Amino acid sequence: MDLNLTDITHATNRHPVALDAAASAATVASHRLAALSLSDVSHDYRNKRAVDHVSLSIGPGEIVCLVGPSGCGKSTLLRLSAGLETLQQGEVSVNGQVIARPGRSVPPEKRGIGLVFQDYALFPHLRVLDNVRFGLNRLPVAEQKERALAALRQVGMEAYANAFPDALSGGQQQRVALARAMAPKPAVLLLDEPFSGLDTRLRETVRDETLHVLKQSGAATMIVTHDPEEAMFLADRIALMRDGKLVQLGSPTALYTKPVDEFAASFFGEVNRLTGTVRGGRVDTPIGCLSAPGHAEGAAVAILIRPEGLRLSAVEQGLGSDGVPNLARVEASRLLGRASLVHLRVLDAEGRPHHMHARMPGHFLPADDTHVSVALDRQQAFIFPR
């Protein structure tokens, strides 16, 4: 069933985008280097387009998180990679070998892919060791046990080898599921919302441990999550999806600091939204002026500012860019633990009020109805066409 690089080249040439010889060679090389490649993948459920012409490659040892709102296609993309859905358009390759294209598909158990499901899918009647051994039945019994114990040791669960799943906590079950996925030493690991069933404190601990285990495994890893913070914590790269399309792909830093549109900017955290008009290459806001390169004169724009982009201080300490304080009235302030959230009321040039949030590090709780000075961190402000 394995297909050679000639097949891959032919598949590349069927891509709707015309490629010259150099580009085709580069595409083939990327297939060969990537542990998992998805090329021009689309998938429909009846009349709904769930995945729309998505291409994505994951290198050995790399962790890529798929994020986006519910129904954006991220779980469908994972299931297509695993072989749990029949591929309708495009190709899926593992280590340069095409494992799925329309009409031809390698069975899931022969793809060299490890799976961790949202509910862990452990067999309740089997002990932990036997759960981990389940995918190793082609090996001699002694080697099965050795490989399974090694995987359990890697996730810190060797001492529970003889326990049944119902005797384990949610975090322990998650580790066993991960050990089972890693025991066959797959080239690719796929994790579908692996931490969603854990409480907040346990989730932080388990995902930290999982990150180190995944990096040690050397497998290419795709993780589906709805949690932006979790994706930023785990991922080398993040693939942000919406309506079946890949909106932006890059490092967590790139997606946070250089979002491509309003959706990308707002997905990774709360934003203050303002509107304005470009005048002389700039746009005025109630808390300062922003340059607007690339936007036409007179264009209506949306301005998105992260709460941590508003820096507050006592009135006499903070001045605006023109030397005059940008004042805001405090409507409420709340300590959130490591940061304080301050609700502000600011006035624009026409005297219209705007409600904004500022997030300050540590303990910063000005009294209600007092005034503070606001300085704008322009690195955390984004302008998009409205």
Image (cartoon, rainbow, N blue to C red):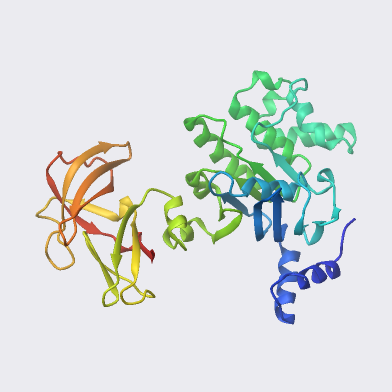
- Residue at 12 percent across and 43 percent down: it is 370
* Quadrant containing the C terminus in the rendered view: bottom left
> Does residue 68 appear left or right of residue 262 in this picture?
right
* Quadrant containing the N terminus in the rendered view: bottom right
> Does residue 130 appear left or right of residue 59 in this picture?
right
Inspect this view and state whether residue 110 appears.
yes
Q: Position of residue 189 (x, y in %)?
A: 70, 46
> Does residue 139 appear left or right of residue 83 in this picture?
right
> Does residue 309 appear left or right of residue 89 in this picture?
left
- Residue at 51 percent across and 30 percent down: it is 202
Q: Nearer the viewer, residue 203 or 376?
A: 376
Quarter of the image holding residue 54? bottom right
**Number of marks drawn:** 0
Residue at the extreme left of the image, as rendered: 316
Q: Position of residue 23 (x, y in %)?
A: 70, 77
Q: Nearer the viewer, residue 99 or 96?
A: 99
Residue 319 vertical placement versus 227 (above, below):
below
Inspect this view and state whether residue 217 appears.
no
Residue at the extreme bottom of the image, as rendered: 21
Q: Position of residue 173 (x, y in %)?
A: 65, 28
- Residue at 81 percent across and 49 percent down: it is 111
- Residue at 86 percent across and 65 percent down: it is 4
Residue at the extreme front of the image, as rendered: 47
